[in-house]
């Protein structure tokens, strides 16, 4: 990290520099998160034919889908620390290479046990990508520009969820080709893509502004001066880990994120199945219709951060988005009309994504410098334990009651809890003292 001294912002120079950074980094990172979520949730679109071939109950499918997050939890923080040590270029490429290989292995699943093991390994392989990119962006964008950067990056998620439904549904049509089931072709072909992208990461990504040859010396110095505090001491070790783990605020962020994402992951993995049951259609058609809620979520993730920045309000934006998500899942559970149920699921997806950039912007501003390395990974990994719990809960209650409605009501409650917790999180001050020990 350069020792360039901090200097006041220069609006004209900053616009020029950040435009360059955005155009050079964001397309590649957004493509990465797009493929990341395709390979994470394609199992949901393939759930019906795969469950039939492997003899899975609804609970067994929910467990297999959720075991991804157990691997994710175990390796998330070590992965983010490794990214800070080895650099984003090498480490993000490593993540993509290994998760691609594990996704390809899913095509050769023989039964419930091999499916569970491979889903765990896919989660372990993907661990660190999303929070790693959030950390990486904090090395390139000043704090005042992070919300916009996070919103742009995160916009790739609903895009990927929408297209993942369409692409995976289309690949299911390969059923019978060369004697293979369509869902096996989906895992094979969708696993090859991140391996190819890993090589692009190695050639095109730059670890830090000081190494960016496409910036002029003046632009490099300016950018380093604006982000030096955020990137300093990024390789601190176990002492920092313990300080973050003992932080009540870090746990509050984690609990809120868990409450937000349990409903999100539940509908992500179960939406094609829910849509198929409500509309009485096959898996390919259900996958196509399941893209609709994510298209609406794209609009929400673009509009919400802009209106928040324009009005200076974060609290009511988060409360409103999460409250809307709760109402949406209630409607999705209670409505007998398949169209109304789809509208409810769409509202749930849009409400969730309206709050995500605001949540991560708040977290990144609180955990500055070295603390961000561990804290962002901790929040993401503990919060995403919901990805293990939520899909299993929906599957359990579907096996118990013959319907997914009870599970959706439970997720509605979690969104309501998250809405009220968002009030507490928006009162958190914008700067952490965790980066160094007291007096250090």
Image (tube, helix red, strand yellow):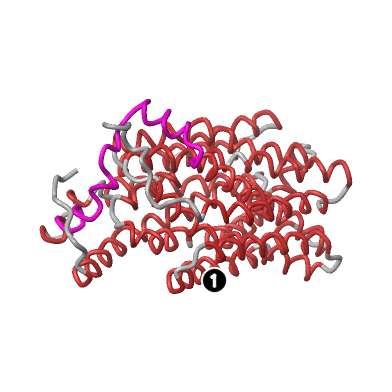
Start-end of magenta stretch: 221-250
Q: Residue 317 versus residue 346: which sits nearer the camera?
A: 317
Q: Is residue 231 left or right of residue 186?
A: left
**Residue at point 81%, 67% (across, down):** 338
Q: Where is residue 301 in the image (x, y as percent from the top left)?
A: 52, 65
**Residue at point 54%, 62% (across, down):** 315
Q: Where is residue 317 in the image (x, y as percent from the top left)?
A: 55, 66
Please indicate, yes or no, whether residue 176 appears anywhere in the rendered image.
no
Within 10 Å of the Cα at label 1, are there few (<14), some (14-19), or many (20+) other Cα atoms? some
Q: In this view, does 251 lie to the left or right of 136?
A: right
Which residue occupies the extreme top position in the image? 238
Q: Position of residue 220 (x, y in %)?
A: 16, 56
> Looking at the image, is 97 positioned above or below residue 415?
above
**Residue at point 32%, 32% (across, down):** 438
Q: Name the residue under label 1.
A: 299
- Taken as a whole, is the magenta stretch helix, strand or loop? helix
Quadrant in the picture for the C terminus: top left
Q: Residue 116 versus residue 103: which sits nearer the camera?
A: 116
Q: Is residue 195 magenta?
A: no
Q: Residue 137 versus residue 20: which sits nearer the camera?
A: 137
């Amino acid at each position: 990290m350069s020792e360039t001294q901090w200097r006041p912002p220069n609006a004209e120079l900053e616009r020029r520099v950040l435009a360059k950074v955005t155009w050079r980094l964001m397309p590649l990172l957004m493509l990465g998160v797009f493929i990341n979520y395709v390979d994470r949730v394609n199992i949901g679109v393939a759930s019906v034919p795969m469950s039939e071939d492997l003899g899975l109950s609804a609970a067994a499918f929910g467990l297999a889908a959720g075991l991804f997050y157990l691997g994710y939890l175990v390796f998330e923080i070590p992965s983010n620390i490794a990214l800070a040590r080895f650099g984003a270029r090498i480490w993000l490429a490593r993540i993509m290479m290994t998760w691609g290989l594990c996704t390809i292995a899913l095509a050769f699943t023989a039964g419930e046990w091999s499916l569970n093991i491979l889903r765990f390994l896919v989660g372990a392989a993907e661990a660190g990508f999303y929070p790693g990119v959030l950390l990486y962006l904090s090395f390139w964008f000043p704090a005042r520009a992070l919300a916009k950067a996070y919103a742009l990056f995160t916009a790739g998620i609903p895009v990927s969820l929408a297209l993942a439904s369409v692409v995976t549904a289309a690949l299911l049509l390969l059923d019978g080709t060369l004697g293979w089931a369509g869902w096996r072709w989906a895992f094979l072909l969708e696993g090859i893509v991140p391996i190819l992208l890993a090589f692009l990461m190695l050639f095109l990504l730059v670890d830090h502004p000081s190494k960016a040859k496409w910036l002029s010396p003046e632009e490099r110095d300016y950018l380093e001066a604006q982000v030096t505090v955020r990137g300093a001491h990024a390789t601190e070790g176990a002492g920092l880990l313990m300080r973050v783990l003992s932080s009540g605020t870090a746990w509050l962020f984690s609990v809120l994120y868990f409450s937000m994402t349990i409903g999100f992951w539940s509908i992500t993995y179960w939406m094609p199945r829910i849509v198929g049951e409500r509309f009485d259609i096959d898996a390919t058609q259900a996958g196509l219709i399941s893209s609709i809620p994510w298209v609406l979520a794209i609009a929400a993730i673009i509009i919400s951060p802009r209106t928040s920045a324009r009005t200076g309000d974060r609290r009511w934006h988060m409360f409103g988005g999460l409250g809307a998500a709760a109402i949406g899942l209630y409607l999705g559970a209670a409505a007998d009309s398949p169209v109304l149920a789809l509208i409810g699921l769409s509202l749930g997806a849009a409400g969730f994504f309206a709050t995500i950039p605001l949540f991560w912007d708040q977290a990144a501003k609180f955990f500055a410098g070295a603390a961000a390395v561990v804290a962002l990974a901790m929040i993401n990994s503990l919060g995403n334990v919901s990805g293990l719990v939520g899909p299993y809960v929906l599957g359990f209650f579907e096996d118990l009651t013959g319907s997914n409605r009870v599970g959706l009501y439970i997720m509605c409650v979690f969104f309501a809890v998250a809405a009220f917790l968002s009030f507490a999180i928006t009162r958190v001050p914008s700067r952490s003292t965790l980066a160094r020990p007291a007096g250090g």
